Amino acid sequence: MKTFCGRANPTTGAVEWVEEDENYDYHQEIARSRYADMLHDKDRNTKYYQGIRAAVSRVKGRGEKAIVLDIGTGTGLLSMMAAAAGADFCYAIEVFKPMANAAVKIVEKNGFRDKIKVINKHSTEVTVGPDGDMHCRANILVTELFDTELIGEGALPTYEHAHKYLVQEGCEAVPHRATVYVQLVESKRMWSWNKLFPVRVEAEDGEKIIVSPSEMEKCPGVPSVCDIQLNQMPSSDFTILSDVVTMFSVDFSKPVRSASTCYRVQLEPVKSGKAQIVLSWWDIDMDPSGTINCTMAPYWVKPASAFQWRDHWMQCVYFLPHEEPVLQGEQLYLTACRDQYSLWYKLQKAREEENKADVRVESPVCRCQAHLLWNRPRFGQLNDQNRTCQYVKSLMKVLKADSVCLCVSDGSLLPVLAHYLGAEQVLYFFMYATFVFFFFKFFKANNLEDKIKVIEARPELLTSSHLEDKKISVLVGEPFFTTSLLPWHNLYFWYARTALSPHLSTNVTILPQAASLHMMIVEFQDLWRIRSPCGICEGFDVGTMDDMIQNSLNFRESKEAEPHPLWEYPCKSLSDPQEVLTFDFRETVPPHGLSTEGSVNLLRKGKSHGAVLWMEYHLTAGISVSTGLTHISNEKGNCEWNPHCKQAVYFFSPVIESQTLSEFPTAVKYAINFDTKTGEIAMDFKL
């Protein structure tokens, strides 16, 4: 039996349906899961164990049997904690069948077969009664149903149902409560992920300014949370405008309502500025008194000694619908609204609140289309003036008064730059109709609707009539394509350039003229945890889970690299960066693959966790843009990365550790193959 999966094809720039083995989805779910990250979260696990022990003790102290309901048991870890703490019986619910099967094995391996029953169902399908899944209602409710936003995985409706049908009134709950905190800030960097700033271009006939359509300026954006590792955001990149305030709490030991609602708090800015961003995080109290607390608070709120790295729970960035000038000491009201799965915010001045007892704020809906076409890193990339300057300098070198310029990149400003910098005719390829409507509005806002010709066609379907029988003298691209997941997927530009060959002039200029793949061996500060076996967790053997993840990672004949935004994940270089493959866009894609073998020398001691790979685009002679490493900041090898792109990470297995220079493996051997038929890169490393 086979299954069909949607996958980006780097040779066509399109998402295509690919036939896969029936187990493909399951293996992807396991291989890319965050189970290992959760099991390595010492703070989380310790606090849960303390909270479970205390809850069992309180129930036993009342002379009752301790019956535990564990919803979303995963490995069965929390149920085993409860059984070890003296619970009489545990019902462990897990809807994902492969995970439920693993939990059964882990429970048996740890000797709790008679104390824990694993139920492979959604909690809303669980029955209670003599013939039911549970013989009686539980008096201790244990769950870990939270995401970075707290409620995004459906915690509220799950709790609501459990209180109605699965647990006793007045039950103990671990965690006992969750509290959401907010802080108002001004941040040009974070605001640049949500709005397009004016782009200034120095042309021969004076400065030109590219502006957004008015609908885009007024658009509230999309409701989805921006979750990031806020601990990697330097304090110089934002200005705090308010104290941290409690937005709302949820008591999990009492009936929970999941229906949409709003919360409102009063704020007084501690500093004047532009209110643009609501930063948010939560904590959970494992016990009623709040003495066992697990918090996601960022570095400026809690002491560094309390810091616990985790990737399954981060912090939230919410964009206010509009930036709002605020004055120190003035009275403001911040409203948070939620449905069952998400939150959004609105800020109002006190005078606007008069006579409004119940202010409901509609969930933001993007009406300008830009927020649907450009994701947040793409907004940041388009707002990067230094990056734009590199393209401007390159275009000024290659454009002539008679240039016929064609742009191939998704949602790009290059056609506008090319027009302002003097191209006689500018054409812009659109492979997706969704882009066309927005860019018509964009061109109109800049009085360019009759200056840039839009072509709705795929490169291989282009005809001479599309070009009015002219030849392309300058072909430009960033390149950037929305379907790209890994750095080399943007090599679709090369395939498009090849398809366009019949329409290119004999002396055509291609910009960028070439690209190169670069690689470096690194030691991660923390990211290694998501792929590292756990073995023993809080005294329980979870090796079955490690084996399950490894089996799924080995499902493919060769392991694949995976995309990560490394500005959020500190690492140090153990080798110099090395160019390993080049792609000459001035030539067509060759029929044979491109391969390279070699070795990269290790220069520093440390743990070789993996290789990082990224692309550099050589626009014209002497001008390049990198999607990866921007700087190695000190002798220790600390790396700085392009914040607008995800880099490719290939995790080594096993990790090689060397503490002294004499222990060094001197080099890492690599073999890298670019398959021109598929547009994919296969790689292998030997330490």
Image (cartoon, rainbow, N blue to C red):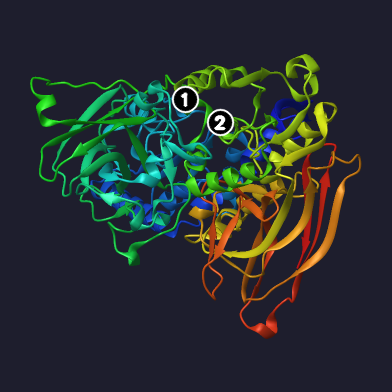
Q: Is residue 441 above or below residue 322?
A: above
Amino acid marked by disc 2: Val
Is 168 on the left or on the right of 6, as rendered? left
Give the quadrant of the C terminus: bottom right
For disc 2, the neighbor class at 10 Å (few under 14, some 14 to 19, many from 20) is: many
SS state under label 1: loop
Which label belongs to residue 446?
A: 1
The image shows a total of numbered marks equal to: 2
Circle 2 is placed at which residue position?
416
Residue 402 position within the rendered picture, expressed as x and y whole percent measured from the top left: 70, 30
Is 585 on the left or on the right of 211, as rendered? right
Q: What distance separates the C-alpha of mark 2 from that of mark 1?
A: 9 Å
- Do callouts 2 and 1 mark residues in contact (Cβ within 8 Å)? yes
Q: Residue at horizontal 24%, vertical 56%?
A: 291
Amino acid marked by disc 1: Asn
Residue 608 position within the rendered picture, expressed as x and y whole percent measured from the top left: 65, 67
Q: Is residue 44 above or below residue 507?
A: below
Residue 618 visible: no
Q: Earlier in the sequence, mark 2 or mark 1?
A: 2
Residue 650 visible: yes
Q: Residue furthest right?
A: 592
